[in-house]
Image (cartoon, rainbow, N blue to C red):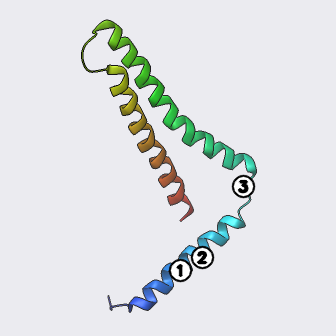
Amino acid sequence: MPDIPEDKKFSKTIETKQARKLAARNADHPVWFGLGMFGLVGWSVAIPTLIGTFVGLWLDKTWPGRPSWTLTLLLTGVAIGCWNAWYWIKRESRKKD
């Protein structure tokens, strides 16, 4: 494969991004589609966080000890939820490319 000059690569990158933005503007997605995606991202973070919190509360009641299971599992749930939201957004952006 021949070497492509840097300015051509940059130009191609800009063209690709511009085409994607124009396609997004002209898309026939209703407002509900955007709200649905917003809700999907919100729930994908909220559900693991709540599950981690409730399991942590149960563990703290059952086996009280020095480390707070509630706090530990709450933070774990937030981390899992953020990873999950990132996964869904990345997946949706791949569909558009």
Q: Residue at x 31, y 7 (%)?
A: 62
Q: Amino acid under label 1?
A: Ile
Tag 2 secondary structure? helix
Give x and y (percent) for residue 39.
62, 39
At x 39% / y 38%, what residue is drawn? Answer: 79
Q: Residue at x 27, y 9 (%)?
A: 63
- Mark 1 surroundings within 10 Å by alpha-carbon count, few (fewer than 14), some (14 through 19), many (20 or more): few
> Which residue is denoted by mark 2 in the rendering?
18
Q: Nearer the viewer, residue 46 or 29?
A: 46
Q: What residue is pinned by disc 3?
A: 29
**How far from the left and from the top, in percent, is residue 24?**
66, 65
Rendered location of residue 85, percent (x, y) = 48, 44
Where 95 falls versus 10 (above or below)? Answer: above
Amino acid carrying label 3: it is His
* Residue where numbered disc 1 is placed: 14
Question: Which class describes the residues within 10 Å of circle 3: few (<14), some (14-19), or many (20+)?
Answer: few
- Which mark is first along the chain, 2 or 3? 2
Cβ–Cβ under 8 Å for marks 1 and 2? yes
Horizontal side, residue 58 vs residue 46: left or right: left
- For the residue labelled by badge 3, is the local secondary structure a helix, a strand or a loop? loop
Tell me which corner region of the image, top left, top right, bottom left or bottom right, holds residue 52.
top left
- In the rendered image, which quarter contains the N terminus? bottom left
Rounded to the nearest angstrom, the CA distance separating label 3 from label 2 is 19 Å
The local crowd at label 2, few if under 14, some if 14 to 19, many if 20 or more residues have their Cα within 10 Å, is few
Residue 26 vs residue 54: left or right? right
